Image (cartoon, grey):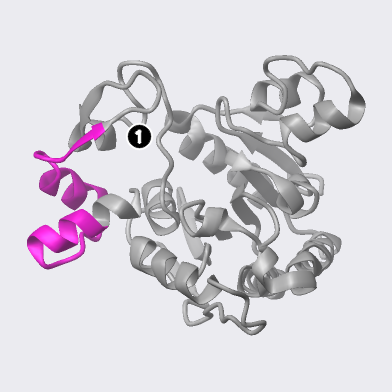
Amino acid sequence: MANVFTNIIKNLTGQQPTDIESLIKHTENVNLVCKGCHGEIQKHTLLKNNMICPKCGKYFRMGGKERIKWLADKKSVEFMFDDYESRDFLEFPGYSEKLEKSRKQTNEKDAVVVGTAKIGGKPFAFFVMDSRFMMASMGSVLGEKITSIFEYAKKYSLPVIGFTASGGARMQEGIISLMQMAKVSGAVKRHSTAGNLYITVLTDPTTGGCTASFAMQGDIILAEPKALVGFAGRRVVEQTTKSKLPDNFQSAEFLLEHGFVDSIVPREKLRDTLGTLLEIHSAGGAAV
């Protein structure tokens, strides 16, 4: 599950848990505070409840590798392109320090993990963005990793499932960051033209250039309940349009109501839903 807890366990036990059972076993004395109800919750209780507060239903954010291990068949996950690492090539003030801080917090080299896995024995390629690494802002490495996994999936005729979470472009990389929108979108198009399925799962938060490009290009677009999804911030939109926006504006529920999302799927039902979609696609019943 969330890497912050993995780090805690690693520091306490000297080793990193490899599956959910190990995480539960090692977190009986770890307590967290829910941002929804502000109540204290034992970590192992959250793990057993799909990282959802049992008191108020608030969704806790999940780390990239932990999310895919939670979702996929046991021992089916293979991570790829893990050696790609962001660099401060523009020598932007403070960027190197922020990168180092994010690496220590997440044990990752950038804000996305990619690879292959299976659900119900059905193979697929994936990318999972991690908002705890500089708010999963789009940089050159993030774009390269997602592009690379789409190219791999096209080569081997694999569907792609992408979990999006982003604060937008990474300003520390200038125009190179914005170029990732077109770069990834091109890879998505080539993958689609080859007749392959692309499913996106919008998680909290999915914003900025990520929303304006590959997050909304899925053949099937799912979302977690109450996820924040949008492009510009609420205040910017209100100031620009000179109008008051609905209270639920830029929520997954608002997008579903207006036809931008196909379905909102509770986390505990997500594995079964994705498994069914992969099954239909593998049987030739999906039109893409």
Question: In front here: 70 or 227?
Answer: 227
Residue 177 horizontal/vertical position (percent): 73, 68
* Disc 1 target residue: 50
Question: Mark 1 is on which residue type?
Answer: Asn
Q: Residue at x 53, y 71 (%)?
A: 94
Q: Please provide the residue range marked out in magenta.
A: 7-32
Residue 9 horizontal/vertical position (percent): 17, 56
Q: Residue at x 20, y 59 (%)?
A: 17
Q: In the displayed structure, would residue 130 be above or below residue 243?
A: below
In this rendering, position of residue 97 left or right of residue 236: left
* Residue 263: quadrant of the picture: top right
In this rendering, position of residue 46 left or right of residue 114: left
Q: Residue at x 67, y 47 (%)?
A: 199
Q: Inspect the magenta stretch and tell me whether residue 21 lies in it.
A: yes
* Residue 190: quadrant of the picture: bottom right
Q: Inspect the magenta stretch and tell me whether residue 181 lies in it.
A: no
Instruction: Work out which residue is located at the far right of the displayed protein and give it.
Output: 241
Q: In terms of secondary structure, where does tag 1 sit?
A: loop
In this rendering, position of residue 139 left or right of residue 114: right
Q: Residue at x 48, y 60 (%)?
A: 117
Residue 141 horizontal/vertical position (percent): 61, 74
Can residue 162 be seen in this snapshot? yes
Can residue 261 be seen in this snapshot? no
* Residue 219: quadrant of the picture: top right
Q: Number of numbered discs present?
A: 1
Which class describes the residues within 10 Å of circle 1: few (<14), some (14-19), or many (20+)? Answer: some
Residue 58 horizontal/vertical position (percent): 42, 25
In this rendering, position of residue 64 left or right of residue 231: left
Instruction: Work out which residue is located at the far front of the displayed protein and give it.
Output: 93
